[in-house]
Image: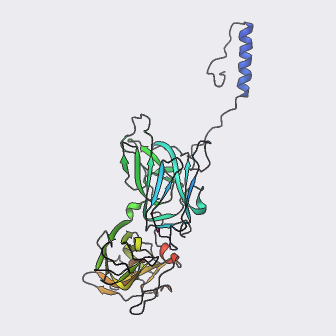
Amino acid sequence: MLIPGEGRSRAARPGWLLMSVLASLLLLEACLVPVATPTSSVTPAPTSTPASAALPPPVTVGLSGKISGLGFMLETVQVVSSDGRAKLTLPKGALVMDDNRQPAKSVTCTPFQPPESKEGLVVGLGYEWATGEAAGELGHHGTIMPVATVSITYDPPPANPRIDLSRPDLPCWWESEGMWKERGAIPTVDPVNHIITSPMANFIPVVVIFWYTDVKVLPGPADRPARRRAVTVDLSGKIDSRGALLEAVQVVSSDGQATLTLPKGAKVLDAGGQPAESITCISYEPPESKEGVVVGQAYYFGGLAAGGTINPPATLTITYAPPPADPRIDPSKPDIAVWWPEKNQWVKSPFPVTVGQASRTLTSLQGNFLPVAVIFWYVDTTPPVGTFLTAPPAGQPPASASGRDVQEHMPQGG
């Protein structure tokens, strides 16, 4: 029999009194050593419960006065971990929502002891940024649109022939499967200072990992900011102190399929009623509709101008692809829809839409910054109309949508 913790045999030995006494003491000590409980083979989820008292404490940054009532950042805000090794940068103009799709009231950074990975070597602590009441409950807690930037300073990993020291990554924690997965975002690495930086579109747990070169890494759709493509037009020198454009301005989507043309003299104001500093067009995979078939990408013109107005309205033109075969739609009748979160659906635009059948283009007016998409309504249903959308009288700005009208257009999971 082996004495626990010793690894030596208790075989018969010479009957010296001293050796017998020592053996008895060792046996008594063995009886007092607790027996180790077998550990589960399932990887535990990240937890905010400190594995040791040495874990850095959480840090909370309040957003009062730094975020608009619609959820758009009024200034750039950084949330830095208490150990100074992890930093989340929320850019001015970004839409920051909590899990209830309400404007975030605060952001908390919580360091935690990360689970290991069978697919790579995890180094250092994990960090979770969460909004408001979600702080301390690690998981997916809110969204950022278009994206924030996360950077972590890491220590060089121990020597391991299975990893590439030049290729650290920032994976996301996939709760349902209890494992780290790729986020779909390509990080930037500073190998000299050991800093890794990456875009982040959701509040999720992250950690630095070096994937094993001899295994296949599984992608995780929890955070794919690359699917949200943004183009920004700076209005510096193109807008006066009252918000009136000094020249016509065009904002074209990254895929070239959507163009917003703002006329010279149009008053372009942000959510706070101030002259807009820039306009960003974000294209993304649109939510589906129960009342029709949505084709192509959805387009959201906003950024620093998000939640604001255009008076007189701008001209919106979208080029669309042929719809899939469906007996319930009329392929000759495309339309422009606007997202209405109160009903969780696409609704008709309040402005008339001109269809260019040969060029496959739709043209309409847009008086405020709201998500739009091309839709073919089902012929056996009546297209829904959003009560918050009303075409403005001539010379008057359109009614601004409420915060809930703007904030809930984002596709969940990136």
Query: Does residue 30 belong to the magenta stretch?
Result: no
Q: Which residue: 53% across, 78% down?
A: 342
Q: Which residue: 47% across, 56% down?
A: 88
Front position in the image: 405 or 368: 368
Q: Position of residue 235 (x, y in %)?
A: 33, 73
Q: Position of residue 334 (x, y in %)?
A: 35, 83
Indicate left or right for 325 with 20 as reference: left
Indicate left or right for 51 with 405 as reference: right
Report the coloring of the rendering. rainbow
- Quadrant containing the N terminus is top right
Q: Position of residue 27 (x, y in %)?
A: 72, 21
Indicate left or right for 258 with 344 as reference: left
Residue 360 visible in the displayed image: yes
* Outermost residue to the bottom: 394
Q: Position of residue 155 (x, y in %)?
A: 45, 40
Q: Which residue: 59% across, 60% down?
A: 134
Query: Does residue 74 belong to the magenta stretch?
Result: yes
- The magenta span reads 70-75
Displayed quadrant of residue 211: top left
Number of numbered discs overlaid on the protein picture: 0
Q: Is residue 2 above or below residue 262?
A: above
- Quadrant containing the C terminus is bottom left
Helix, strand or loop: magenta stretch = loop
* Outermost residue to the left: 358
Residue 329 visible in the displayed image: no
Front position in the image: 278 or 388: 278
